[in-house]
């Protein structure tokens, strides 16, 4: 579907309907047949899952599956930052001093647009970033690339456009879509953040500290500040999940982290090395690999 035609769709109603359908617990034999067909269609590696296919009660149960404890080993180097999600690299590089990031070739956006805050954008201007796209076949839980103390959770309202590669190459989507921003701090790495971006038919986003935060439940504040030490995560620890595929943007402070130069389309797996503590090489400013 042409990306601009999505504007004509009832994105939120469609996403809610798909979410309800995905959570339905039909007779197990029927669920097993549907999930088996889905796994074949998208080439899901069922050997990595912590449960057999017959144990999943619904699509959502399967989409948010956990993996075997040994399925995603952490990079051995204790100074290495690790991939926060399974998927493929959409873009990576160094945000320009003005806070410009690359979404895809020829498509740029600003940190302030993505984060919804000039103050937060200033913390990450000139810093490294990595954008990972999660396809339907991927493991849908998000993990910490480094150690950190959670400072804030922000909910940013927006559209629910598709984030599939064919769309983001033609239309700036990430700062327009509904998203959840998690900001962390660490004495060695400085501030870092994860932006979990919602998308068309994504049933929701959860964090391990609050449960569902997108769509934002009634009565829950759009921003929550955490007390010092209230929410701590170790490198590789679970942070949250998507109820379907989407996109994660990892942001790091200037001169604190040196990320590897991944080419767009490069597969990533949770726990693999994506960089190391230390100052990046001179230059940059929004490269994509």
Image (cartoon, grey):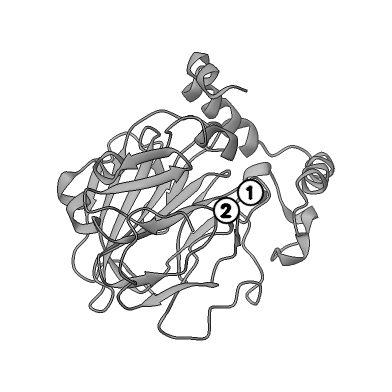
Q: Secondary structure at mark 2?
A: loop
Q: Which residue is mark 2?
A: 140
The percent coordinates of residue 231 (x first, y second) are 30, 66
Q: CA distance from mark 2 to mark 1?
A: 6 Å
Residue lying at 31% horizontally and 38% vertically, measured from the top left: 156
- Looking at this rendering, what residue extends furthest in the left direction? 119
Apparent side of residue 123 relative to residue 14 in the rendered image (left or right)? left
Q: Which residue is mark 1?
A: 63
- Looking at this rendering, what residue extends furthest in the front direction? 283
Q: Quadrant of residue 215?
A: top left
Q: Nearer the viewer, residue 206 or 71?
A: 71
Residue lying at 25% horizontally and 70% vertically, measured from the top left: 255
The percent coordinates of residue 107 (x first, y second) are 42, 37
Q: Is residue 161 above or below residue 213?
A: above
Q: Secondary structure at mark 1?
A: helix
Apparent side of residue 29 relative to residue 105 in the rendered image (left or right)? right
Apparent side of residue 103 relative to residue 269 in the rendered image (left or right)? left
Residue lying at 57% horizontally and 34% vertically, measured from the top left: 19
Apparent side of residue 276 relative to residue 124 in the rendered image (left or right)? right
Q: Are the two marked residues, 2 and 1, in contact with CB atoms closer than 8 angstroms?
A: yes
Q: Nearer the viewer, residue 259 or 217?
A: 259
Of mark 2 and mark 1, the one earlier in the sequence is 1
Residue lying at 44% horizontally and 56% vertically, measured from the top left: 92
- Looking at this rendering, what residue extends furthest in the bottom direction? 77
Q: Is residue 266 above or below residue 14?
A: below
């Amino acid at each position: 579907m042409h990306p601009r035609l999505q504007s004509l769709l009832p994105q939120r109603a469609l996403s809610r309907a798909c979410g309800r359908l995905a959570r339905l617990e039909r007779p197990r034999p029927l669920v097993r047949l549907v999930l088996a067909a889905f796994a074949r269609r998208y080439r899901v590696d069922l050997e990595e899952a912590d449960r057999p296919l017959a144990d999943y009660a619904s699509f959502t149960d399967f989409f948010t599956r956990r993996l075997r404890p040994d399925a995603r080993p952490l990079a051995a180097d204790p100074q290495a930052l690790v991939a926060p999600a399974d998927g493929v690299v959409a873009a990576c590089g160094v945000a320009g001093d003005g806070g410009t990031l690359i979404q895809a070739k020829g498509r740029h956006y600003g940190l302030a647009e993505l984060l919804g805050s000039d103050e937060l954008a200033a913390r990450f201007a000139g810093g490294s970033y990595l954008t990972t796209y999660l396809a339907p076949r991927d493991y849908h839980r998000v993990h910490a690339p480094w150690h950190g103390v959670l400072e804030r959770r922000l909910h940013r309202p927006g559209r629910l456009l598709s984030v599939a590669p064919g769309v983001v190459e033609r239309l700036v989507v990430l700062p327009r879509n509904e998203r959840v921003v998690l900001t962390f701090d660490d004495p060695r790495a400085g501030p870092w953040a994860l932006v979990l971006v919602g998308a068309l038919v994504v049933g929701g986003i959860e964090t391990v500290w609050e449960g569902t935060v997108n769509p934002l439940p009634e009565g829950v504040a759009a921003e929550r500040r955490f007390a010092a030490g209230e929410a701590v995560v170790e490198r590789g620890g679970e942070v949250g999940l998507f109820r379907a595929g989407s996109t994660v943007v990892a942001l790091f402070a200037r001169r604190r982290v040196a990320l590897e130069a991944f080419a767009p389309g490069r597969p990533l797996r949770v726990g693999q090395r994506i960089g190391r503590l230390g100052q990046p090489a001179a230059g940059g400013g929004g490269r994509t690999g």
